[in-house]
Amino acid sequence: MRRAVIAGTGSALPRRQVTNAQLAETVDTSDEWIVERTGIRMRYIAGEGETTSSLATDAARRAIESAGIEPSAIDLIILATATPDQTFPASATIVQTALGIDDCVSFDVQAVCSGFLYALSVADSMIKSGAARHALVIGAETFSRILDWEDRTTCVLFGDGAGAVVLRGEDSESGVLATRLHADGRHNQLLYVDGGPSTTQTVGKLRMKGQEVFRHAVTNLAEVLREVLAAADLTVADIDWVVPHQANRRILDATARKLGLPAERVVITVDQHANTSAASVPLALDTAVRDGRIKRGDLLVLEAMGGGFTWGAAAIRY
Ligand code: UT7
């Protein structure tokens, strides 16, 4: 059966690391509060010259290298981001040019923290339909540029970064087994940016009612995880690794408990990277592939939930 197989992974982080203690020098917060409430210990913040497309390009180069192909073999680029370099053109086309790819299908998707799951699902469909052979799927963000640095309830939670995978269409038992996506726009006032080209003509700042998002996250994530497992005819016991969106350690623990999943089977990077929105799942995936936790043949479940609300999951034989 033709499937989209993960041929390579890559990731990239900005140069500057910022610890909780460093943040507490300018924001009314403490290392103790951030660690206890979120599990975050540090995050990376983009500096001069570092943009969503530059981080995406670095992550993409590493994914292409680990897939053992030339950039010219890529015929589809989907970049998930809510913080593009410009309102248009799509940052995916900037990455395409930086990689030296003359002609391919190239576009951005915007589903905030679930963006990578949305992008992966679209790429999977295009590969299965024969519209693409080698897809580069990237999640990249510079959320530091849409944070209100005076709002301690949000600015301590996010970081910048990028992650990427190369999907290859081939007849295989491995690859993307099933994906499930959801959205419910009734909740868009719980997590949003208060600006945009068609309303304020400004970029705007992130606003969130954290406690309410938290409650929805645990319920939605546990449900979509069960749903994608059922679609692939698998159970929680078959999972080798859950690679979740890294928003808050307490959400990861509560979701695992709800599913009866041992905590040792959840990839956790939120302590190192904080919440990097669409970048967080591919960044965690690449981290766990490179440090040897995730091995060929493992059953992975990727999941995420974010503004919109949007949420989704993918079951993948790595
Ligand atoms: O990626 C998209 C999905 N996003 C999420 O999943 C985020 C989901 N939400 C969360 O992760 C959590 O709700 C937060 C981490 C945002 C907040 O944790 P919480 O346990 O829900 O805290 P809280 O909002 O109930 O605030 C508790 C207290 C408040 O003080 P009072 O009113 O009890 O006196 C806050 O003012 O903590 C205070 N507080 C802080 N204190 C020190 C809020 N932020 C901070 C801070 N430092 N940074």
Image (tube, rainbow, N blue to C red):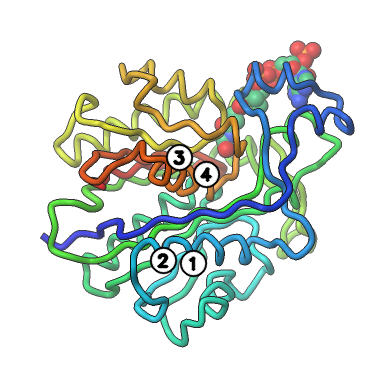
Tag 3 secondary structure: strand
Q: Is the shortest distance between ligand 1 and the CB of mark 1 under 8 Å?
A: no
Kindly identify the amino acid type of the residue bearing the numbered disc 3.
Answer: Ala
Name the spot of residue 127 as percent of width and height, x first.
26, 67
Q: Which residue shows up at 33% across the image and 40% down it?
A: 294
Q: Which residue is mark 3?
A: 304
Q: Nearer the viewer, mark 4 or mark 3?
A: 4
| C-beta proximity under 8 Å, tags 2 and 1 | yes
**Of residues 65 and 130, the one drawn nearer to the viewer in this rendering:** 65
Mark 3 vs mark 1: which is more N-terminal?
A: 1
Mark 4 vs mark 3: which is more N-terminal?
A: 4
Q: Which residue shows up at 57% across the image and 54% down it?
A: 12
Kindly identify the amino acid type of the residue bearing the numbered disc 4.
Answer: Ser
Kindly identify the amino acid type of the residue bearing the numbered disc 2.
Answer: Glu
| C-beta proximity under 8 Å, tags 4 and 3 | yes
Q: Determine the image quadrant of residue 242.
A: top left
**Of residues 199 and 55, the one drawn nearer to the viewer in this rendering:** 55
- The picture quadrant for ligand 1 comes to top right
Mark 1 vs mark 4: which is more N-terminal?
A: 1
Q: Which mark, by number, is residue 61?
A: 1
Q: Which residue is mark 4?
A: 280
Q: Nearer the viewer, mark 3 or mark 1?
A: 1
Name the spot of residue 124 as percent of width and height, x first.
29, 60
Q: Is the shortest distance between ligand 1 and the CB of mark 4 under 8 Å?
A: yes
Tag 4 secondary structure: helix
Q: Is residue 267 left or right of residue 261?
A: right
Q: Nearer the viewer, mark 1 or mark 4?
A: 1
Per the model, the C-alpha gap separating discs 3 and 1 is 24 Å
Mark 4 vs mark 2: which is more N-terminal?
A: 2
Q: Nearer the viewer, mark 4 or mark 2?
A: 2
